[in-house]
Amino acid sequence: MQQHLLTTYFQPILNLQDGRTLGYEILNRPPESKLFPNTESFYDFIGHTDHVFAFEHFCRELSIERFRAACLTQEQKPQDAVIFLNIHPRVLADSNYRSGETISLLNRNGLTPEQVVFELTEKHAVHDYVEFERVLSHYRSQGFRIAVDDAGSGYNSLKAIVSLKPDFIKLDRFLIRHVDTHPEQQHIIKILKQYAASSGTNIIAEGIERCEEVQFLQSEGIDYGQGYVLGRPDTELK
């Protein structure tokens, strides 16, 4: 953190029906090291330390500032896109995080809360859903939106969908891989699509790597998609 050694990547999220870019998930990755063979092991380690809040605060500022810088480099307007920020639920529930720092940070970088989606993952399970829903209400009243990541990967993600009523449901990549040839995966996606339609939620299919997967998702009316076949994470906005 002191040396700002994290590299920031932007992965596009596309509207599968018309091809337009909804926005970008912002990913911060550490340099390669023997201690952490991959990014996931690094973040797992952070989650078990007492530096979670400081690190999340650092990543939030880094993400937003570098997004604005990338927009200026590409001659894009920061207010034209939605950004998805991975957030630990414990941080959202912390009173210091709700002090207005985030809105002040957005204002300094030409962004609004309506452009920001807080992405919660299955790995960081919520334990008190009633209390956490109150926390989310605070953010929603300011214009922020919520996404539940890894949907379909386990019990907690399904419980989060029902309890937290997210604005976006991000389908886990294991549901998407070769979905065009797996009826069981197709059935689950159709059920989640029906639920999303009835609850006013948008679905984002993650981990799309083949054109055949895109075609199936388009035929099922899935809203948005993210994956290598649509756009790899890049330090520039693509």
Image: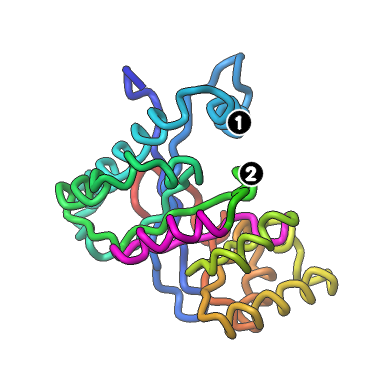
Is label 2 in a helix, a strand or a loop? loop
Residue 165 shows which numbered tag?
A: none
Is label 1 in a helix, a strand or a loop? helix
Percent coordinates x, y for residue 224 in the rendering = 52, 71
Residue ID for mark 1? 44
Pointers 2 and 1 in contact (C-beta within 8 Å):
yes
The answer to which of 26 and 94 lies nearer the viewer is: 94
Q: CA distance from mark 2 to mark 1?
A: 9 Å
- The amino acid beneath tag 2 is Lys
Q: Which residues are magenta?
A: 130-153
Q: Quadrant of the C terminus?
A: bottom left
- The answer to whether residue 209 is visible is no
The answer to which of 220 and 57 lies nearer the viewer is: 57
- The amino acid beneath tag 1 is Asp
Residue 145, picture quadrant: bottom left
Q: Residue at x 56, y 80 (%)?
A: 199
Percent coordinates x, y for residue 25 in the rendering = 44, 52
Q: In screen coordinates, is 55 left or right of 62?
A: right
Query: Vertically, is 116 above or below 89?
Result: below
Q: In screen coordinates, is 67 left or right of 9?
A: left
Residue ID for mark 2? 123
10 Å crowding of disc 2: few (<14), some (14-19), many (20+): some
Q: Residue at x 49, y 41 (%)?
A: 90
Mark closer to the chain start, 2 or 1: 1
Percent coordinates x, y for residue 54 in the rendering = 38, 28
